[in-house]
Image (spheres, coloured by chain):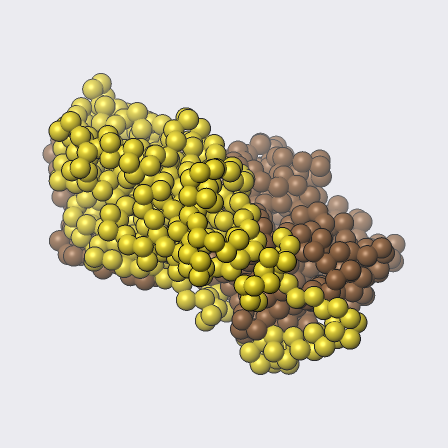
Chain colours: A brown, B yellow
Amino acid sequence: MSRKDAGNRDLMNRRRVLATAAGVGAGLLGMTVKGTEADSTRVQGDAPSTLGARSPFEQLERKPLAGVVSLTPLERLEGTITPADLHFERHHAGVPRIDPSRHELLMHGLVERPLAWSIQELRRFPSVTRTCFIECSGNYFPRAGEFSPPHLVCGLTSQSEWTGVSLATLLREAGVRTGGTWLLAEGADAAVMSRSIPMDKALDDALVVYAQNGEALRPAQGYPLRLLLPGWEGNTNIKWLRRLEVTDAPAMSREETSKYTEPMKNGSIRQFSFEIEARSIITQPAHPAVIEPGWQEIRGIAWSGRGRIARVEVSTDGGRTWEEAALQGPVLAKAHTRFRLPWKWDGESTELLSRATDETGYVQPSLKQILAVRGPGSAPYHFNPVTGWRVQRDGELRFSPTG
Amino acid sequence: MSRKDAGNRDLMNRRRVLATAAGVGAGLLGMTVKGTEADSTRVQGDAPSTLGARSPFEQLERKPLAGVVSLTPLERLEGTITPADLHFERHHAGVPRIDPSRHELLMHGLVERPLAWSIQELRRFPSVTRTCFIECSGNYFPRAGEFSPPHLVCGLTSQSEWTGVSLATLLREAGVRTGGTWLLAEGADAAVMSRSIPMDKALDDALVVYAQNGEALRPAQGYPLRLLLPGWEGNTNIKWLRRLEVTDAPAMSREETSKYTEPMKNGSIRQFSFEIEARSIITQPAHPAVIEPGWQEIRGIAWSGRGRIARVEVSTDGGRTWEEAALQGPVLAKAHTRFRLPWKWDGESTELLSRATDETGYVQPSLKQILAVRGPGSAPYHFNPVTGWRVQRDGELRFSPTG
């Protein structure tokens, strides 16, 4: 289709009308011949297999970066579930190889009964399933250039249906003693990654999970056990979980001082900034897609660590006007929520923006608003600015960090 | 743990108490040494990768059977999402290899405007995401013996988060003419699999889907396009969809006469029995698991093609008494719903049963009730009997088909 005749087309303009009965016959015949690589109706297909592979026409992959992360290709995904092999990864000393039959979870410290559980023992407890996102608090790349696709803007967020045992259940088993107000959670990786978790969160909605999208956790997500703290920054969701120590104060472990704190404008340092604030991104259309004038659907995801997404507004004119996008239900708390808005591009340059509001009333800020609070020394943690895509007259899209 | 001391253990009895402070230290040290294959804290782990593989300790696979199906390992799964590579497959002439750039969907017949769409054109339409199961109507194996695990009882049901375009949208584009009361849906496989679909269903909740659990459909599930008829028997969800013809009557195609009809007791044949009736199965514990006395959680899935699951009752005494299981929310319509019930096994032989009721009030029948209606000539379609697991004193479980 040339761009010139696009203006004459209606909402569902990407079609070819087969006008006559003869046309239908020819179209049908043509489809049979050219609709498949050979003619798929004349060749016996592949036999049933033990594992269903992807089509060779779908080359999906995460993007490894800097030796410590790989990014989820958000622009290639639909709906809200991230396939397990495309879930982002971030680790501080690589992905350990763990034999589950030798792995144990120890609970000790300020408890009545120090306990250790095998994986099989944990699987016998009452189980809970919950769909939620995990996002790295460092999910912002200050140097993302205009040629960045969505995964280079915020590809450190992914979503799964997780299953495991409630941490409150395990704490009841051990019996928390007076003064037990924090937990130190420790992983079995070579970084011995550890974070201090307030007891309130542990007793609220924390899970010790062993399954992800129906199957066992993948190694990059913590196999065989992971702490799941719905809505809290990714690094607190300790992977390869092996130890929970009930304490009366935060442990001030390496990763809660050397990283994961935010200098503020007044010179103070914000620490234990656990909750992920509301954020959104348009994933389609986005760089490197090239669009044509006419109707298309703007699609993206929005999420908040504080609860449900209440509203996503989209601007197709660089922020002058905003329209409310449709949210795909069921809208779950602390979960990626798919938003959509039909849009008819007139072929002129413009900018597409999205802005999320969660059920607490929190509104995703602009970069300018964040910097006004955080100052020039800002570390790239908990950066959730409104970002955009500049649409060029040639149909190409460019990342716009300032929203 | 020996079975003898099981009676003394409480709900969370699968634990080892570390009684002293010294014990804690020893346990911790012991765990570090034997808790991993080597000591995973002393070895740099694997670098980030493009695709996250499964742990080598988790050998998951579908079970190919009879050259035309492969079965989802229900007993190995948690939650409700089936990983795409474990989604069951059933095909009549193998899985075709289709180049999506050459694939088109044709709509013709009793329409104002015959149309053809490419995959890219379909992706520009307003999209819809829905999580639901697909079950083969032949998901019953009359010869499933007592050593059958759940996948051999009903492994032809799986669940995904599907994304695509509403069929009603496409029908509005083409404009259905007077008398257009049926659709013939046709696939591009070597069976040219085709089924007649009433227009009411097409306009209700039918989708033409291109994505499954976030990514493009897998070939075994219809890549690049599949008709999705939520709650209707699997074979009507035409895979490799290439043609939709609006008609004024069912086409009486091969697969709606040679298969997928049910002889009834009175000598008549039931045809176009589209809806999947409510069903359930306990997936844990189940053959080939071996259980120990004490507390564990009975887990399973329930589903109905007619709407939401309202209730799942579980009997742990061979049907004498029934207890209501907890349902994991959100409970979605026409979707696998996870149910759970804590159970303390006393070590005696018994039988575990589950029985689903959907929101229409339909109650999953016994095999005897089905045979009373269907007679001795019953074809194995739309068989959804209550089934059970006989628990032996040695902790082994045996499939029990009569419920």
Q: Is residue B195 above or below residue A279?
A: above
Q: Position of residue B237 (x, y in %)?
A: 29, 40
- Residue pictured at 64% horizontal, 80% vertical: B33
Q: Is residue A118 left or right of residue B125?
A: right
Q: Is residue A282 above or below residue B306?
A: below
Q: Position of residue B92 (x, y in %)?
A: 19, 50
Q: Is residue B23 in view from this perspective?
A: yes
- Residue pictured at 17% horizontal, 34% vertical: B263
- Residue pictured at 66% horizontal, 66% vertical: B16
Q: Residue B286's quadrant in the figure?
A: bottom left
Q: Is residue A226 in view from this perspective?
A: no
Residue sitting nearer the eye, A374 or A71: A71
Q: Is residue A219 left or right of residue B89?
A: right
Q: Is residue A81 left or right of residue A107?
A: left
Q: Position of residue B305 (x, y in %)?
A: 36, 34
Q: Quadrant of the C terminus of chain B?
A: top left
Residue sitting nearer the eye, A94 or A5: A94
Q: Position of residue A78 (x, y in %)?
A: 46, 47
- Residue pictured at 59% horizontal, 45% vertical: A335
Seen from this angle, which residue lies furthest top?
Answer: B178
Q: Quadrant of the N terminus of chain B?
A: bottom right
